[in-house]
Amino acid sequence: MSRYIALLRGINVGRAKRIAMAELRALAEGLGHGRVATLLNSGNLVFESARRDALALRQELQQAIAAQLGVDCAVVVITAAELDAALAGNPWPDAVDEPSRFLIAFAEQALTPALPLAQQDWGVDRLAVQDKRAYLCCGSGILESPMLKAFTRAAGTLSTSRNWATLQKLQNLVRA
């Protein structure tokens, strides 16, 4: 059995795309996954599965969420090892001092469209792109960051980000 993290994009923000975490856990259990848990109310699902194909797991979850919960949202599935590698690969150790302003974005495909953005000067913001993940340090905050807005447009809908504090909590949950 392998441990996975499913990151749902854009749910429970405002009134649209609402999913109760209890329903999300029940859905994952109904699909045959074990040791299912959620973190916060923003679409962070940790589960165990005998299946080894993260893309197939993503497609299955995305389709089941749409069919059973009536919410169309992108889902990114990563392994516990991928989460560990993302946290260990942090290019800016000082950024963890403000964990709510430091994000890691995960995508199902290489973030090639965002590569030119990493070469730009963003002032207090910083961006590093590494294949299917990106590190975003939003010095002026995530709501005010022009870099984050440009990255979100370039990365497209099959990517989603979480802040450093949430990712550390997910890592602890995966290991529990």
Image (cartoon, helix red, strand yellow):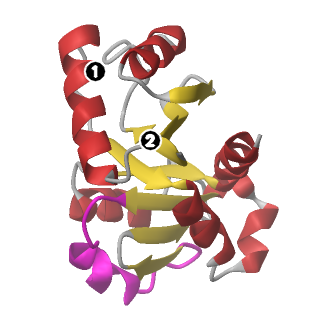
Figure quadrant of residue 35: top right
Is 50 or 149 nearer to us in this picture? 50
Disc 1 marks which amino acid?
Answer: Ile
User: Where are the magenta residues, as a range?
Assistant: 107-125
Look at the numbered disc 1 and give the secondary structure of its residue. helix
Q: Mark 1 points at which residue?
A: 65
Q: Where is residue 48 in the image (x, y as percent from the top left)?
A: 53, 38
What residue appears at the point 24 percent right and 21 percent down from the top-left corner? 64
Look at the numbered disc 2 and give the secondary structure of its residue. strand
Question: Magenta stretch: residue 119 in it?
Answer: yes
Establish if 11 lies above or below 86.
above
Q: Would you say the residues marked 2 and 1 are in contact, meaning their CB atoms lie under 8 Å apart?
A: no
Q: Position of residue 52 (x, y in %)?
A: 38, 53
Left or right: 25, with 9 as reference point: right
Single out the residue that lies furthest toward the right.
Answer: 97
What residue appears at the point 29 percent right and 42 percent down from the top-left corner? 58
Q: Residues within 10 Å of mark 1 (few under 14, many from 20)?
A: many
What residue appears at the point 45 percent right and 70 percent down from the top-left corner? 134
Left or right: 81, with 129 as reference point: right
